[in-house]
Image (tube, rainbow, N blue to C red):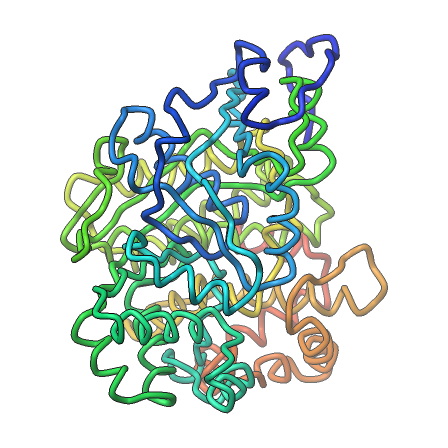
């Protein structure tokens, strides 16, 4: 994390984060003002990563600070190897997390105590935990790629290898959705009301997506159960937002040196948070509106605003910045080419696809996004923005391209963004400093290198590009943009786009 102008305190003895050491922490650190022993579970959350702890867990923590809804504490869970690693880090510190808000005007540290347990990484244990009658919400942050969606249809991909395995061995679930089905089936057999399933992932209509995946798998395994789920289980849509960099040695050291806390898994984030939700919770919900959550009738316009402007903006600066050698996002935003590319692309091509929202100024929102990206205290990195492009591009960029083409509008800037992604993938194959962090990394590099002879080769991935791969206007614009990048330096190509 970069140094700031803020004075650095002398290093003091550190205190290991645990319940019994909370009173020993510096007075500058906010600790839970509620009795954690009085908390009882209400939410089981799958995917206890940095974003969940900076966002959802922090909202619940603030609600508990008001003395409200203490029967809605969070139980953590996961299915992946990295979930087990997180559990191992958090167990010795009683599931407590230090969350540091990185405001250039001053850092603020809070110890978050809203999570009270973490289920062992075992499908059977997770199915059992979801049957607890106290669990009324199962929430998810399983990444954009964790819902088994088909880029070709936009719906549930029943041919995905993990789904095929799940159907063939439904008595022993290996995916979170297989576990959810087993738990719902058991609750129905016991006469228990079903829990609400609340997606907190960055997906358009994430509740509808979660519903499609749960029902799609259920219809393959147990059609009768699928009918019951369709009639009784709620899947509220929500829009979530808080820029949360990955935790590494820098972040752990910052918490140790600045706040004298030995935390094995701290979280750093920006001071901005937003959570907009559809109020659809048949088994009840905590009063999160008291701590800033917006409950609205229709989340879709807020989702589209965020996904296209903020997430699309991250995609716009990711590959261009990587190709120009930037590491930190705030440094990239200080480069007039990068900030200019973001501003022009957003104003001319992205903004016209975003619906007007009553009471919201989209121009103010765009300015806020640029300010957030420029936060030098945050230390967000370009490699983080570049990861998982094969899942993020179909969610954050390609739908905007399709919307523009459907309206007969130009896509020069958006096509250039996709071409920058392809050029980035090809550069990784050349032994440069670029390393692709993507489940499809090998295929992306292979297609990107083949695109040097024919740019259309990069588009020959129907699971990513869907119908756009055969859409003439997009193919032509992408081909032209990639040819320019192959012939001229990236800085010149972006400069020419800005000058056009």
Q: Position of residue 193 (x, y in %)?
A: 21, 64
Of the 4 image quadrants, the one containing the N terminus is: top right
Q: Residue 225's image quarter?
A: bottom left
For this orientation, the residue located farthest to the right is 431
- Quick check: can you spot residue 500? no
Which residue does the image show at 51% across and 20% down from the upper left? Answer: 108
Left or right, 452 with reference to 274: right
Q: Residue 196's image quarter?
A: bottom left
In this view, the residue in front, 154 or 486, is 154
Which residue does the image show at 16% across and 75% down from the upper left? Answer: 231
Q: Position of residue 349 (x, y in %)?
A: 38, 58
Left or right, 56 with reference to 187: right
Which residue does the image show at 46% across and 38% down from the upper left? Answer: 370
Q: Position of residue 278 (x, y in %)?
A: 20, 53
Q: Position of residue 211 (x, y in %)?
A: 30, 71
Which residue does the image show at 56% across and 85% down from the upper left? Answer: 161
In this view, the residue in front, 143 or 425, is 143
Q: Does 435 appear above or below 178?
A: above
In this view, the residue in front, 12 or 367, is 12
- Quick check: can you spot residue 236? yes
């Amino acid at each position: 994390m970069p140094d700031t102008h803020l004075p650095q305190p002398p290093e003091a003895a550190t205190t290991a984060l645990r319940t019994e050491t909370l009173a020993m922490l510096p007075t500058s650190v906010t600790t839970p003002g509620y009795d954690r022993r009085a908390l009882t579970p209400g939410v089981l959350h799958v995917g206890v990563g940095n974003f969940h702890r900076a966002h959802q867990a922090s909202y619940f923590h603030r609600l508990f600070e008001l003395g409200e809804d203490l029967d809605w504490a969070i139980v953590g869970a996961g299915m992946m190897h990295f979930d087990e690693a997180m559990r191992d880090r958090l167990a010795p510190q009683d599931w407590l997390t230090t969350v540091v808000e990185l405001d250039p005007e001053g850092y603020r540290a809070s110890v978050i105590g809203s999570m009270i347990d973490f289920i062992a990484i075992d499908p059977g244990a997770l199915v059992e935990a979801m049957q607890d009658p106290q669990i009324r919400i199962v929430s998810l942050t399983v990444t954009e790629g964790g819902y088994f969606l088909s880029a070709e249809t936009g719906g549930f991909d029943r041919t995905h290898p993990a789904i095929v395995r799940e159907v063939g061995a439904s008595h022993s679930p290996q995916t979170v959705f297989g576990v959810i089905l087993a738990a719902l089936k058991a609750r129905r057999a016991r006469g228990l009301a079903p829990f609400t399933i609340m997606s907190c992932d960055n997906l358009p209509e994430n509740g509808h997506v979660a519903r499609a995946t749960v029902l799609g798998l259920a219809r393959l395994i147990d059609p009768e159960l699928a009918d019951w789920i369709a009639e009784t289980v709620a899947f509220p849509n929500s829009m979530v937002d808080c820029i949360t960099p990955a935790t590494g040695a820098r972040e752990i050291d910052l918490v140790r040196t600045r706040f004298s806390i030995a935390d094995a898994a701290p979280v750093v984030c920006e001071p901005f948070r937003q959570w907009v939700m559809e109020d659809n919770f048949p088994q009840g919900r905590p009063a999160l509106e008291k701590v800033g959550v917006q409950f609205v009738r229709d989340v879709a316009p807020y989702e589209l605003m965020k996904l296209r402007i903020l997430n699309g903006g991250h995609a716009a600066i990711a590959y261009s910045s990587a190709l120009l050698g930037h590491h930190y996002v705030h440094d990239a935003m200080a480069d007039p080419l990068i900030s200019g590319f973001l501003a022009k692309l957003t104003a001319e091509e992205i903004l016209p696809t975003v619906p007007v929202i009553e009471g919201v100024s989209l121009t103010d929102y765009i300015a806020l996004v640029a300010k957030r990206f420029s936060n030098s205290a945050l230390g967000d990195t370009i490699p983080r923005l570049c990861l998982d492009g094969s899942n993020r591009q179909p969610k954050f960029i390609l739908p905007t391209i399709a919307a523009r083409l459907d309206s007969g509008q130009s896509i020069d800037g958006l096509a250039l963004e996709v071409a920058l992604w392809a050029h980035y993938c090809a550069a990784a194959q050349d032994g440069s400093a670029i390393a692709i962090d993507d489940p499809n990394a090998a295929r992306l590099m292979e297609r990107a290198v083949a695109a040097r002879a024919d740019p259309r080769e990069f588009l020959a991935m129907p699971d990513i590009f869907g119908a756009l791969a055969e859409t003439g206007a997009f193919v032509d614009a992408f081909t032209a943009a990639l040819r320019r990048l192959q012939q001229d330096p990236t800085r010149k190509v972006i400069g020419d786009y800005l000058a056009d």
